[in-house]
Image: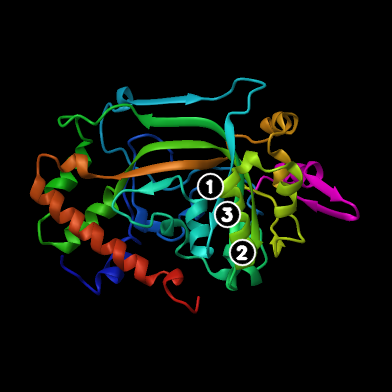
Amino acid sequence: MRSWPGLFWLLTLALLADGGRRESQLRIGKAINIFLRYGYLGISMRVIPLNDNSEPDRWVFKEPTKNIYRNLSGLAESHEDTTPGIFHGDFHMEFCENRRQLFQAYFRDFSIERMDKPWEAFTGGWFSDNAAKKLGINTSFIQGDYSYVLVRVVRFRETGRLNAEIPVHQPLEPDVRSRMDKLQIGNITSAVRFMEDVGTHYVNSYTTGNSLYQVFVYSRKNYSMIKERIKSKGLNGLSKLDLYNYFAPWFAEHLGQIRSASANATVERWARRKLQYEYYVVKYVTLLKLHGNSTLLRSLDSLLGNDAILQLDLKSLKPIFREEPDKESWYHEVLDNNVKLWELNMPQSHPTR
């Protein structure tokens, strides 16, 4: 494997150029360049609240995309879950030993082929203060020696995916074919230009909808206790009293705000009003009130719209090189080296961030 220390800067400069004919649509088979906003993909994909909620336009996806194949619609399928009275989603919690596991847990359903840590394409540029704000917790609790439980209620709306492998002889768009012809084995600049003009990955599947989530912060001791208790009994094996006790302000170090993936203020106001729990004189808001509560879930169903990306699977452009294995090998070598360089240069890679 070759390594080029200066390639990070070369790629950065190249990506400032005009990427050609592109549009911003989340569609199956469309190509994107993950390096265009690596570490900050949440800026162009609605996956977690932005720190600036003043933007008036409601959008789900505005990352530049490009068609690479012609007549691909026959291989793509999509469906919407719109049956009234049924909550198409799930309630789940994830146990996270540290903040890195917390970031990973939030992006569990996001995969990017040839990346060992795909969540870093979204979180690599986070500093402690904006990470805490996105997750709804105080900054002091993301910097210290804490563990976390991420509780989330997800409402699925639309799912799209490729229903078959792309055929070897599926016709390429003419400009993509032209760019492939210009890709020269051993020439780094030609590979970077190809990524800029065509992309690095294509959309293999996606799910959109919305979610509510809440982060509970624990000391190491209490975290281990609750993890072992739920592991041995299961969530449904706990009494309601035990469940509320483990996620109460007197057991957790900190209860985060309930946030929606799309930063929908209406949904978050509903949560603050409907998900209050009162124990003697103590009042607090907890997402646990939704667990097993079909009435509240039905009420929430109509509020959680098709406002955010909940799952995304990006595949490398390997299929377009199947008849040119040497070019495929060279392209992936440059791609893999760039992934490593971007990972090393992100704020998360430095302990002083």
* Mark 1 to mark 2 CA distance (whole Å): 17 Å
Residue at image position (30%, 25%) is 75
Task: Decide if residue 251 is on the left or right side of residue 148.
Answer: right
Which image quarter holds the N terminus?
bottom left
Magenta span includes 85: no
Look at the image and name its color scheme.
Answer: rainbow
Q: Which residue is tagged 1?
A: 46
- Foreground disc of the pair 1, 2: 2
Sequence-wise first label, 2 or 3:
2
Sequence-wise first label, 1 or 2:
1
Looking at the rendered structure, the kind of residue marked 3 is Glu
Q: Would you place residue 266 above or below residue 217 in this image? A: above
Task: Decide if residue 301 is on the left or right side of residue 190.
Answer: right
Q: Do the residues labelled 1 and 2 touch (CB within 8 Å)?
A: no
Q: Which residue is tagged 2?
A: 132
State the extent of the magenta-drawn residues as a range: 263-286
Looking at the rendered structure, the kind of residue marked 1 is Arg
* In-front residue for pair 131/46: 131
Residue 228: give its label. Answer: 3
- Foreground disc of the pair 2, 3: 3
Q: Do the residues labelled 3 and 1 touch (CB within 8 Å)?
A: no
**Where residue 192 appears, x then y in whole percent?**
23, 59
Q: Report helix, strand or loop for mark 2.
A: helix
Q: In which quarter of the image is residue 58?
A: top right
Q: Is residue 271 visible?
A: yes
